[in-house]
Image (spheres, grey):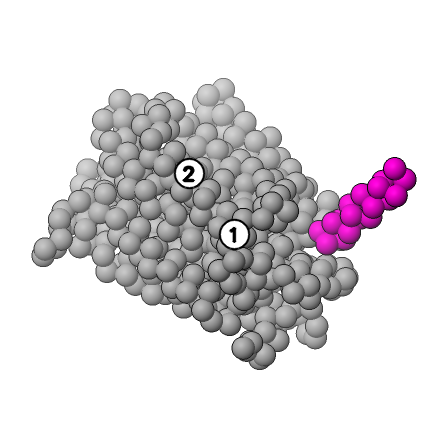
């Protein structure tokens, strides 16, 4: 039996734009906030353990994200397909959701095993100085191995959120995420420090806590998809892979996977340059990135809402409404990020110091470097926010190759080469790191907005499929 009011609320193709956009966006922002709570919780407790532990998780994160990015593109493909079919009222929501779930779990299992095996090789790619290699790399390896073994649980929850987002609702994933984060925050100190009957696992403890909490979230999410009517109506036989749907998931997902991989590889490249500096700089860079990700939560949530709204409206044959929604979201996020950037620019040190609590050598230096980085990054907040919205619109339209192109432009044409030049040619030291990190965000924003105004993205994947089918039929008739 279908919950009619919930289904109507999840439809984004009629009536006022503002209310449905923010009704979908605010739970997605909360989900992103709770995602950061995982990372901040780990950083906080590991910061109480030692500054080297903070540096280790900073070193591990871009390498983990590199593996996650590959599967992340396919979860986005599922969200795009669900959104456009929902807008077109094709009745295939549940089947597409089931195909996405089974495919992603296979990908996650393979990636997790691969990541576990090549952990040392991944870390060996980073040209760390002797002090960093001795103090931080072994800790990062210990964290990464446990994390990789739990990859199916991590991806399981990601795909649940993506499918519900494409369907047009995010409240159920938000509630599941709350439960998962609370479990993680409770388990972190128990496993890191060995409280009571729990073993003292230190770095591995943070990863164990994350894997357990993600496993619980995935189990709840799959139960909601299979046994309730809060989202797409998935049946057991929908989980059996069907080539035509897997092919479409791959077609849409590969560019997004490449986009996210390019992002991850740029993080690895940036980290590879940063680790040529002492541990205090490495820790400050990783800590700064985590704080910046916290400031970007509204743009990430609203960007995800935009891809669902654009997808549903293009599926329903309403491209003008999709465009209006994108400009509305871009204007809103520009105002929000202007406020966030002003705060980060004016008072960075109190913000950074909250997350470096261990009273050991290097604390003051880490806080000083982190504060400088945050002040530089604040200048680009508005640009990064607008880019997230516009790229979300491209993805919602199924133009995942376009989003990939602008990611490559911002990261590999601007950020990484500029940082390299400032560090190793101009010899600007740490200033080169902080300045290089924001150049790509500004370049990508101007280029993406300019391309969006051309309007060439206003065609749904369903129209593409219909055109391809007509071409095949015509060819068959001619033969």
- Asked whether residue 204 is in view, the answer is yes
Residue 434 position in % (x across, y down): 45, 37
Find out whether residue 475 is within the magenta segment: yes
Calculate the distance from the C-alpha at mark 1 to the C-alpha at mark 2: 18 Å
**Percent position of residue 417, x then y:** 54, 27
Res 366 → quadrant:
top left
Task: Tell me which numbered mark, 1 or 2, is placed earlier along the sequence.
Answer: 2
Where is residue 238? Give x, y as percent: 54, 57
Residue lying at 28% horizontally and 42% vertically, measured from the top left? 146
| Residues at marks 1 and 2 touching, judged by CB atoms closer than 8 Å | no
Placement of the C terminus among the 4 image quadrants: top right
Mark whose residue sits in front, 1 or 2: 1
Q: Residue 110 has which mark?
A: 2
Left or right? Give the position of 469 relative to 53: right
Exactly how many numbered labels are in the figure?
2
Whether residue 369 can be seen here: no
Crowd around label 1: few <14 · some 14–19 · many ≥20 (10 Å) = some
- Residue in the image at 45% along x and 69% along y: 227
Mark 2 neighbour class, 10 Å CA radius: few under 14, some 14 to 19, many 20 or more: few
**Which one is nearer the viewer's eye here, 379 or 232?**
232
Question: Which residue does the image show at 47% across and 37% down from the upper left?
Answer: 264
Please report the bounds of the magenta region as a residue range: 459-479
Q: Residue furthest bottom?
A: 5
Q: Residue at x 31, y 28 (%)?
A: 120
Q: Position of residue 334 (x, y in %)?
A: 59, 57
Q: Which residue is mark 1?
A: 240
**Dominant secondary-structure state across the stretch colored magenta:** helix
Residue lying furthest top in this view? 425
């Amino acid at each position: 039996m279908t919950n009619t009011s919930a289904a109507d609320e999840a439809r984004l193709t009629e009536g006022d734009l503002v209310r449905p956009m923010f009704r979908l966006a605010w739970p997605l922002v909360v989900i992103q906030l709770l995602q950061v709570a995982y990372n901040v919780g780990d950083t906080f407790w590991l910061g109480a353990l030692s500054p080297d532990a903070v540096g280790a998780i900073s070193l591990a994160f871009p390498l983990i994200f590199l593996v996650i990015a590959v599967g992340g593109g396919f979860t986005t493909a599922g969200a795009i397909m669900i959104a456009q079919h929902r807008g077109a009222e094709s009745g295939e929501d549940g089947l597409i959701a089931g195909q996405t779930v089974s495919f992603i779990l296979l990908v996650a299992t393979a990636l997790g095993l691969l990541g576990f095996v090549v952990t040392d090789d991944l870390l060996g790619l980073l040209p760390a100085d002797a002090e960093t290699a001795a103090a931080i790399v072994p800790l990062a390896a210990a964290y990464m191995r446990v994390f990789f073994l739990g990859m199916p649980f991590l991806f399981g929850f990601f795909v649940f959120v993506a499918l519900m987002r494409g369907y047009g609702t995010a409240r159920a994933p938000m509630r599941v995420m709350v439960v998962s984060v609370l479990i993680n925050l409770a388990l972190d100190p128990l496993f890191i420090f060995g409280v009571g009957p729990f073993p003292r696992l230190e770095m591995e403890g943070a990863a164990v806590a994350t894997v357990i909490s993600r496993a619980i979230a995935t189990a709840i999410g799959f139960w909601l998809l299979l046994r309730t009517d809060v989202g797409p109506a998935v049946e057991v036989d929908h989980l059996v892979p069907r080539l035509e749907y897997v092919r479409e998931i791959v077609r849409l997902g590969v560019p997004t996977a490449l986009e996210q991989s390019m992002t991850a590889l740029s993080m690895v490249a940036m980290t590879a340059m940063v680790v040529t500096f002492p541990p205090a700089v490495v820790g400050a860079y990783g800590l700064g990135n985590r704080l910046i990700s916290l400031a970007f939560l509204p743009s990430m949530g609203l960007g995800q809402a935009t891809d669902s709204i654009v997808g549903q409206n293009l599926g329903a044959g309403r491209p003008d409404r999709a465009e209006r929604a994108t400009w509305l979201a871009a204007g809103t996020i520009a105002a929000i990020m202007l406020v966030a950037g002003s705060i980060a620019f004016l008072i960075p040190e109190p913000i950074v110091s909250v997350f470096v609590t261990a009273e050991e050598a290097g604390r003051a230096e880490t806080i000083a470097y982190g504060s400088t980085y945050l002040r530089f990054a604040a200048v680009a907040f508005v640009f990064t926010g607008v880019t997230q919205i516009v790229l979300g619109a491209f993805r919602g339209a199924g133009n995942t190759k376009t989003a990939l192109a602008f990611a490559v432009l911002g990261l590999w044409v601007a950020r990484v080469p500029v940082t390299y030049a400032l560090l190793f040619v101009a010899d600007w030291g740490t200033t080169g790191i902080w300045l290089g990190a924001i150049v790509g965000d500004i370049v990508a924003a101007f280029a993406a907005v300019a391309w969006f105004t051309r309007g060439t993205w206003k065609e749904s994947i369903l129209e593409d499929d219909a055109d391809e089918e007509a071409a095949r039929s015509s060819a068959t008739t001619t033969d």
